[in-house]
Image (cartoon, rainbow, N blue to C red):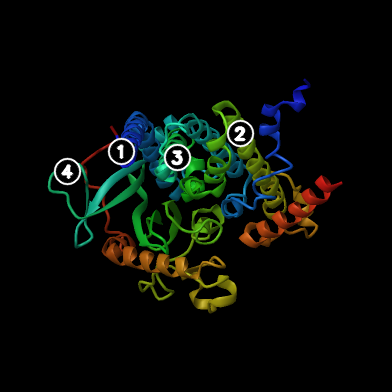
Amino acid sequence: MSDTLKSIWFAALTALISSLLLTGASLGLKEYRLKNIKIDNQKNLLKSVGLIRPEGQYASVEIEKLYRENIRTYRADKSGRITPQKEPGSQGLPLFLYVQKETVRAYILPVYSRGLWGRIEGYLALENDGATVSGFTVFSHGETPGLGGEIGTRWFQENFRGKKIIDPRGKFAPIAIAKGRVTDRIPQGRQANFVDGISGATLTGRFLSEGLRDTLMAYEKVSANFRAGRIKLTTGEKSSP
Amino acid sequence: MKLTATKEFKALLEPLVKNNPVFIQSLGICSALAVTVQLKTAVVMGLAMTLVVAFSNLIISTIRNVMPRNIRMIVELIVIASLVILADELLKAFLYDISKQLSVFVGLIITNCIVMGRAETFALGNPPWISFLDGLGSGAGYSVVLIAVAFIRELLGSGSLFGFQMVPEAFYRAGYQDMGIMLLAPAAFIIIGLLVWLQKSLVNE
């Protein structure tokens, strides 16, 4: 057998063996991986409405239980009317409600934003007054660790709590990330609409600001309904199953 | 023969101190900057790295005599890449939170020159068992640096170790502040520089 042929055979064999091994490992671990992602997702939703502490350790059964008892999946149509996702004919933008004793305490919007290196995915929770941010979490991003990656940290996310999505006159004003500290950079009257930025991550901040603006704009009808007190739970699902 | 004089012992220990991959060979600096803000990530990264180097050395040394010379680098890369993907999958399945923090850096073990470097310079010319030990030693040498840097950075930058608060509250009330620069990449450069200095002056004694 010539040397070239031998090389080709060897390369093909190596590739075959390693791809079989990796496929096996990936399939074998898939269940664990998907479960981890699901729990992580639920954890972020719960964190955004303050049902679990950011640094706390929770078993996955606890997370699942809290999620089942408090969070419901809804959809919002063009006029800002919300219906349970389970109901037939329910369509539009997905959102989550934090419901306690049949009252909506907060609503949670999924945020998909452009980042510097890839997509940023997170949740923005707003209180039932339709104006106050209850929390913000990021569960997936590809930003530079130590710089833009700081969006995944506790200090940055806690920054959002209590901020407003309306200006003092009640008009829509999306929340944005300041370039530096809010108290240094933003005039007094507008400080409620800004959060502290990350030094060394101006672009990540700008992209995330845009993403938050787009998300809030898309859901503005829902927020307006909340502000006007027009959101009533339709009796699709009485208590959680 | 004394244990410390055996070839195996030398293969394991030499890269730990005398021929440390980060200090002497200046390899793997990039990831040493990125994952050393916290001890937890540094330890996991060190473990993943050690396993990858050890097994890549073992496998490459085993097939070194049947491997055609002209495609040797490609085959080495396939072996290394497969091991790294495997390590990444395992982290995602069992240490999901940490794997999220390490993000791209586990995948970047593939490009860590220590792995390819040890395969080329050691595993190709030595039998499997010794190569495996050399891999363990190199990985441990890398981990030691990572952990040392992370120790300093987390303690001075966040006032904690493994996430546990170390600097007492009273210090903060008395006006103590965490050093913000420790959380940024330049701090890792400075610390590695100082450690290289320390290591050189100790070994030359």
Specify whether residue B182 is in view: no
Q: Residue furthest front?
A: A2
Point out residue A166 in the picture as x, y percentages from the top left corner.
40, 70
In this view, the residue in front, B118 or A207, is B118
Residue wearing tag 4: A87
* Disc 1, SS: loop
Marks 1 and 3, Cα distance to the nearest angstrom?
38 Å
Is disc 2 surrounded by few (<14), some (14 to 19) or many (20+) residues within 10 Å? many
Question: Image quarter for residue A18?
Answer: top left
Relative to A1, is B149 on the left or the right?
Answer: right
Rendered image: mark on residue B136: 2
* Disc 3, SS: helix
Marks 1 and 2, Cα distance to the nearest angstrom?
37 Å
Q: Quadrant of the N terminus of chain B?
A: top right
The amino acid sitting under disc 3 is Asp
Discs 1/4, front: 1
Discs 1/3, front: 1
The amino acid sitting under disc 2 is Leu
Label 2 resides on the chain identified as B
Q: Residue furthest top?
A: B1
Circles 3 and 2 on the same subunit: yes
Residue wearing tag 3: B88
The amino acid sitting under disc 4 is Glu
Residue for point 17% across, 52% down: A91
